[in-house]
Amino acid sequence: MIDWNVVDTVFLDLDGTLLDLHFDNYFWREHVPRRYAAARGLSLAGAWAELETRYRAHEGTLAWYCVEHWSRELGLDIARLKREVAHLIAMHPRVTDFLEALAALGKRRVLVTNAHHKSLALKMEKTLLAEHLEQIICSHDLGVPKESADFWPRLQAIEPFDRERTLFVDDNPRMLQTAKSYGFRWLLAVLSPDSKAPAQKPGEFPAVRYCADLLPELSA
């Protein structure tokens, strides 16, 4: 699937790729609606209907991923609410084994995420993933999300890479399509971002269920 002899750098998404997306899905679809309903005196169904409209209005923008934006928008302390369910933060199977296998082959491991700094700090605290990465790049520092065509040029200015020798792994086809348009040779989709949800169907990109599925070829 991947010629590891010609890959120098691996760009890795966080939520859904290295970490189980169940935490984020549960937080935004269940925990926030309950807290919002209680704060506003709404039914759970009424709270969800209002939140879903607000979510959709910002989907695909940097604001969608911003803890501070949603704290202002909803009148809730989103960072505090995330800590209330932080026990749900979990890595996908054998993520550290996968990252260490990359290191053993001399690959540069770069986390490329849309997660807001406050969410990122909490997840690094709970998983210690930073110990297995050479670099962490947050889209909030670049001013655009990974969905934007401007993202990769801005990233390349601070983390130079060869598009012919870099692999990008993400669970979101939209992110992979943006990278493809920028000229990435190597792209890989993750099909099981949320362990509590059905796997996604394979699309146009080569795919694995989890990153750990690459371990046999990395060890070969």
Image (spheres, rainbow, N blue to C red):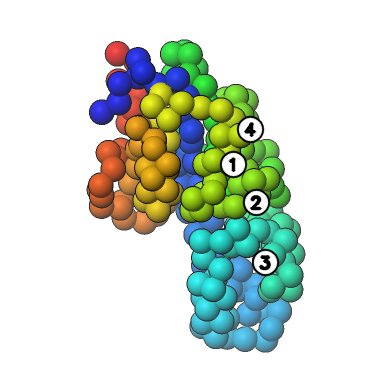
Task: Check if mark 3's residue and mark 4's residue have beta carbons within 8 Å.
Answer: no
Question: CA separation, marks 2 and 4?
Answer: 13 Å
| Disc marking residue 70 | 3
Q: Which residue is mark 1?
A: 154
Question: CA separation, marks 4 and 1?
Answer: 7 Å
Question: CA separation, marks 2 and 1?
Answer: 9 Å
The residue under the point 54% across, 46% down is 151
Question: CA separation, marks 3 and 2?
Answer: 17 Å
Q: Nearer the viewer, residue 5 or 128?
A: 5
For marks 3 and 4, the one nearer the N-term is: 3
Q: Position of residue 96 (x, y in %)?
A: 50, 27
Q: Position of residue 113 (x, y in %)?
A: 56, 44
Q: Which residue is mark 4?
A: 158
For marks 2 and 4, the one nearer the N-term is: 2
**Helix, strand, or loop for circle 3?**
helix
Vertical position of residue 76 compared to residue 150: above or below: below
Can residue 79 be seen here? The reply is yes
Q: Position of residue 78 (x, y in %)?
A: 69, 62
Which quarter shows the N terminus? top left
Vertical position of residue 10 compared to residue 56: above or below: above
In which quarter of the view is residue 80 placed?
Answer: bottom right
Task: Check if mark 4's residue and mark 1's residue have beta carbons within 8 Å.
Answer: yes
Q: Tell me the kind of residue under disc 3.
A: Trp
For marks 3 and 2, the one nearer the N-term is: 3
